[in-house]
Amino acid sequence: AQTVTQSQPEMSVQEAETVTLSCTYDTSESDYYLFWYKQPPSRQMILVIRQEAYKQQNATENRFSVNFQKAAKSFSLKISDSQLGDAAMYFCAYRRPLNFGNEKLTFGTGTRLTIIP
Amino acid sequence: GAVVSQHPSWVICKSGTSVKIECRSLDFQATTMFWYRQFPKQSLMLMATSNEGSKATYEQGVEKDKFLINHASLTLSTLTVTSAHPEDSSFYICSASGTSVGGGETQYFGPGTRLLVL
């Protein structure tokens, strides 16, 4: 079974600085998808970024980028120029490709990010 | 695009009553919808997966007769908590995926429903 591990329960960063959230996963599959979701105090889950395992290029969305190391099964999220609105719980998630059926997301336990003004 | 709504956002009910929560995909057709439960300061726990027109697939340990799921159309799924008890109090979140958004692999989440059973 696939597992997702977020080893940092809490992180904090000074506003405008850069922070990296860690995520590792375990799978025997070669093709899969990885996601970072953000859950602010409103508790709305918001997609931050996604990565297809077959793509070597790291995904980037504005100030958010990932460091995807397939061999190491690592998928870290880098937030540049941190803003107060980035304060949230961040969840890393894994899913298998669609051709395996309606596969569920496997979530990590989350990292709570605090932004220090 | 890829907006999912939930209704109601808050519900308080008496023990023994049933509560229905709606999940709608507003701007795409959701071939698959998922229902999660989240306890405070914890991750999301998948309860069930539903495909339009089919019976839901429940995760191990989730009571089918307690949590009734209906996915009658490509834009609507409902979760009914039957004979609710205080231990059912929680935050319920739905998500939806469709081939027209994110290739079908990405789940888009609703804002959640807080249920309090007195």
Image: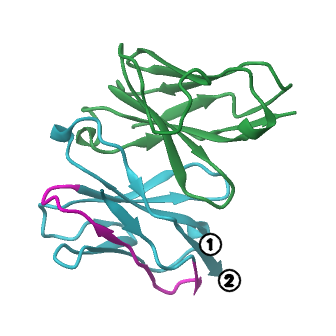
Chain colours: A cyan, B green
Q: Which range of residues does the magenta coloring cover?
A: A10-32
Cβ–Cβ under 8 Å for marks 1 and 2: yes
Residue B92 percent across, percent down from the top left = 62, 39
Measured from the top left, where is residue A14 in percent x and y?
59, 87
Q: Residue beneath label 1, please?
A: A84
Using a 10 Å C-alpha cutoff, classify the residue at mark 2 as few (fewer than 14 neighbours), some (14 to 19) or many (20 or more).
few
Chain label for disc 2: A
Label 1 secondary element = helix
* Left or right of B88 on screen, residue A43: left
SS state under label 2: loop
Q: Quadrant of the C terminus of chain A?
A: bottom right
Horizontal and vertical percent for residue A10?
A: 59, 78
Q: Quadrant of residue B58?
A: top left
Q: Name the residue under label 2.
A: A117
Q: Nearer the viewer, residue A35 or A106?
A: A106
Residue found 45% across the figure and 73% down from its top: A6
Residue at the extreme front of the image, as rendered: B61
**What is the C-alpha distance between the residues marked 1 and 2?**
7 Å
Image quadrant of residue B74?
A: top left
